[in-house]
Image (cartoon, helix red, strand yellow):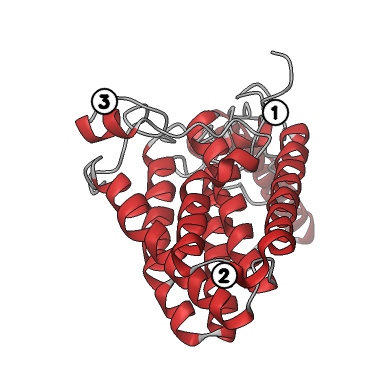
Amino acid sequence: MVGTTAPDRKKLRLAGLAGLVVLAGSGRRACLSNPAFVTPVDPSLSMLMPRRPCHGMRVSTMRTRLPRAAGVAEKELDSEALGKYAAALGAQLSAITAFLATLDAMVGAALPDWSVFALFFGMSIRSRIFSPLDNSRPDATKAARGEASGGFGDRVMPSWTPPGVFFPIMWIIIVAPLRAASSVLIWQQVGHLCDVSILALMLHLCVGDTWNTINNVERRLGAAVPGVLCVWASALLAAYSYYQVRPEAGQLLLPMCLWITVAAALVTDTWRVNNASGDEPLYPYRGQAQTRFWFSAE
């Protein structure tokens, strides 16, 4: 600097350093006192409050642990119910297999076509008599009148749900005769009742009976969703098995597969509209219901 001596320049430099120290201290106090520079305690507020750390400062974020909402993760899987479902399915299919094998041994191929049709029509609507689970069905009369019965009127249904009278018409007047007619074609082709293709249809009936317990008796609306998908998959398996033996028999089961596809969509949407709070998981959980065999004590 012109006109200054070395001691003067040294004094000026010291004064400048002192000014910087004072300025830094005041800036730090301004950052701490200004809410715009403070990281919010609640992370959810970080979108609302700007976070501009001061130069040279280490800003730490204080995070709070938000309470965990009560929901699906807190439900305990009912493994006992799952075990009973599997045991009932196996027992029912074994009983039906033994029944058909006994008929083969007693009468063989001497059965007339009409009796085979009657047999499988009866199996289609009453296969649950072989199941150890409570498989009581919704009251068709109440359902037709729109009154509450197991699976009908006891839950909020989607807006596109068909009228109650539509369900017994589909199951009894359309699906059951098609199952029976297709089974007659298989019996005519193979000459016996206890055939692996026919047992595929019996497996489908057993899965459907187990699902009925889950959905209509125990009212496990979440667990009914994967359950009805199993019913749908077993229907496709039965149609495929019949088609392999006699194509027209498999084709007769296609309307059944289409109807169960619609039913699966309805069951899934029913779970959605009844699960607004998000506390109904897609599996059976303890405390929701108790799975019992019909012969067990209450």
Residue bearing mark 3: 147
Q: Give the residue at x 43% y 55%.
A: 264
- Looking at the image, do the residues carrying marks 2 and 1 touch, with CB atoms under 8 Å apart? no
Lower sequence index among marks 1 and 3: 3
Lower sequence index among marks 2 and 1: 2
Marks 1 and 3, how far apart in space? 27 Å
**Quadrant holding the N terminus:** bottom right
Which one is in front, 8 or 295?
295
Q: Amino acid at mark 3?
A: Glu
* Element type at mark 2: helix
Q: Amino acid at mark 2?
A: Ala
> Whole-percent x and y of residue 271?
44, 41
Hey, which quadrant is residue 104 in on the image?
bottom right
Please tell me whether mark 1 or mark 3 is closer to you in this view: 1
Q: Give the residue at x 44% y 83%.
A: 248
Pointer 1: residues within 10 angstroms few (<14), some, or many (20+)? some
As displayed, is residue 260 above or below residue 197? above
> Whole-percent x and y of residue 230?
59, 57
Pointer 2: residues within 10 angstroms few (<14), some, or many (20+)? many
As displayed, is residue 178 above or below residue 246? above
Q: Give the residue at x 47% y 78%.
A: 249
- Looking at the image, do the residues carrying marks 3 and 2 touch, with CB atoms under 8 Å apart? no
Residue bearing mark 1: 293
Lower sequence index among marks 3 and 2: 3
> Whole-percent x and y of residue 296?
74, 21
Which one is in front, 32 or 276?
276
Q: Give the residue at x 39% y 54%.
A: 263
As displayed, is residue 141 above or below residue 251? above
Question: Along the horizontal axis of the image, is 177 left or right of 234?
Answer: left
